[in-house]
Amino acid sequence: MRSIFVLVLGLTAVAYAHAASSSADLPHVRVELVSDASGVIAPGSLHAGLHFKLESGWHVYWKNPGDAGEPPRIDWTLPQGVTAGPLQFPVPKRLPLGPLMDFGYEDEVLFPVTLKVDASVKPGSILHLPAKVVWLVCRESCIPEKTNLTLDVPVVSGKPAPDATTNTLFQRFQAALPKPLPSRLKAGFTATPTSFRLTVETGKRETEATFFPADAGVLDNPAAQKLTVTAKGFVLELKKDSSLTTNPTELRGVLELSAGRAYELLALPGAVQTGAQLPTEPVPAQLPQAPMRTAPVSPAPVSAPAASSIGLARAVLLAFFGGLLLNLMPCVFPVLFIKGLALVKSGSAERHTLRVHGFVYAAGILTSFWILVGALLGLRAAGSVLGWGFQFQSPVFLSLMAGLLFFLGLSLAGQFEIGLSLTSTGGSLAAKQGYTGSFFTGVLAVIVATPCTAPFMGAAIGYALAQTAAVTLAVFTALALGLAAPYVALTLQPAWTRALPKPGAWMEILKQATAVPVFATVIWLAWVLAQAYGAALLAALLASLLLLAVAGWFLGRWPAQRWAAVVASLIVAGVIALSLLTPSKLSAAPQSVAATHAGWEPWTADAASRYQAQGRPVFVDFTASWCLSCQVNERVALQQPEVQKAFTYAHVALLRADWTQHDDAITQTLTQLGRSGVPTYVLYVPGSPSPRLLPEVLTPGVVLDALADLRK
């Protein structure tokens, strides 16, 4: 059991670690960093590229993905003296998917990028060029993926020879890049109520033309593009997007003509104009947790009260009270059952023994929080943006956590006795295993508490994660002390323990009943895993639970036999290996929480900005399927008929930000709001410079009062 707990606490490293090489093989795609030469001169340029080889039927996306998807993104960590230009996107294909139309690439694609090396880089050295690559690969379903790659390039004194294996690849895809529109070509457009008429003069009759818009939300992507040939070019009829309310001031995109000719196009309203070139900056993009419609326009920063304004003293106080209230949250109920049973068993113990158990339990909580803070700070230093409950975004963590609680539940239900069982403190509470049990009960309390955000916690944690390491540690320590305080107080006050019932036969019944909320938590974790990662991973989890039940049967059937313990240990080790290896192979694309509730649409920063520009109030629910507090708030408040009617009456746009899997855009927005986890509820009021943050615990009255303020 100890090894399982230690492994659970180390899951972050497993979930976020990636091998550093020039290529990676992932489900349905091989991705590789390549260069067209065997070296580079300093000063000089290196033509590199991000190369995808895709399984048949799967695709990745252009810089405007169309109706769904996101383009690949590469984040370099370059040595001094090296700079990288933007990824360049070859001309895409139109990829119909049911009633939708995507723009992307099948089979194989190379995204070229130019790296410049200045004179400070010395010949004879090796340039190590690491990069984090993020992309979305889709067929009928979509899988968000990421990996770390490193390209090693020698710095040479003479002209480097072309790389025989990649030079042809670069030539082929460099030819597929759109060219700047020549000045002899002219383009313009006029708007009708339902379409845009794009007129292009090339100097000759054109028989083929396809326009790929650079901006989302302008054209109806699946609609056919009607071509009318003219003496000097053509007119292309482009149907407007049904949600477009204002005609754009320009049409930007890529124009593909016959014979493989493709140009960057910027057309202005009115008569045809001399060809203008598109800006060379890439379309900003961030990979979401589920495919959704996106726009390339960068949203304005969120205006919210600065998290740092609350101050250290107030943050520590809020964290302590948040930790106290965390004991009442549904996430921690199973642990409270376990500790309540242990306290009943220890009612007649000596005062000193009870105190030690209380302090050991607090030490388990403090140690776990400090490990959690260390992981957060380490990943933050490495460039990751994470928040409270981040480990529940890992399928590895969810699988191991479900297995751990299931094994504990089997013991509580009476299938077998664990030497380190957290409830085996009866005979001798001063024994080593009893203290170990108290320590790991504190560990377990922290693990199951992290998907919840209690009142007062949001502002405190948001403040802590934006400050120095010392301040972060102080706030999280206060949170840990608040979580530990109620049980420690019980152990310090012997009069309270004397009021507890005397030990007896009823305690075995209570112990078995304690397994019920533990098994309920396992069901919840299985639901979270299926909701976020698909049925295949759920099946693997159920198989793991079956194996754990077999291991428990060996321990219960032959409790005194060493060979039975060895067999059970081997089964448990196999389950751990299964939990570590299967998520990367079986994970499916996550389903957005917003998709499961009528009236809500998936959150994007651009969607929030668009509705605000229309003068509509916007209510954003930052949630996750692993957040029990979120699910409770939805059922007791947001789904209530009177609240839904109030939303409709006030013409409020409802957006749901699904943080079930890690999403940089959501994490950054939470940080701007002074929060670091879910649940977080935000109401954007027209004309107000700052959004209104609602409490972490909602009631219908809280929401109705906030909506009533809109009418004042």
Image: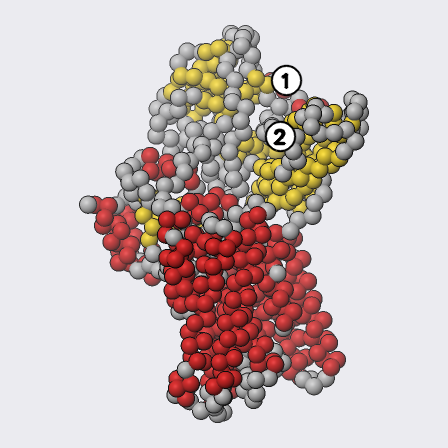
Query: Which is more toward the observer, 531 or 490?
Result: 490
Residue carrying label 1: 259
Give the quarter of the figure containing the C terminus: top left
Q: Is residue 653 left or right of residue 152?
A: left
Query: Which is more toward the observer, 350 or 218?
Result: 350
**Identity, as a three-letter code, of the amino acid under mark 1:** Ala
Q: The residue tagged with tag 1: helix, strand or loop?
A: helix
The residue lying at 38 percent from left, 53 percent from top is: 311
x and y, in percent, of residue 302 in the image: 39, 41
Mark 2 to mark 1 CA distance (whole Å): 32 Å
Q: Residues within 10 Å of mark 1 (few under 14, many from 20)?
A: few
Q: Is residue 304 left or right of residue 584?
A: left
Residue carrying label 2: 84
x and y, in percent, of residue 657 in the image: 43, 48
Q: Earlier in the sequence, mark 2 or mark 1?
A: 2
Give the quarter of the figure containing the N terminus: bottom right
Can the viewer see residue 67 in this picture? yes
**Identity, as a three-letter code, of the amino acid under mark 2:** Ala
Is residue 519 shown above or below 49? Answer: below
Number of callouts in the render? 2
Disc marking residue 643: none
Is residue 259 shown above or below 83? Answer: above
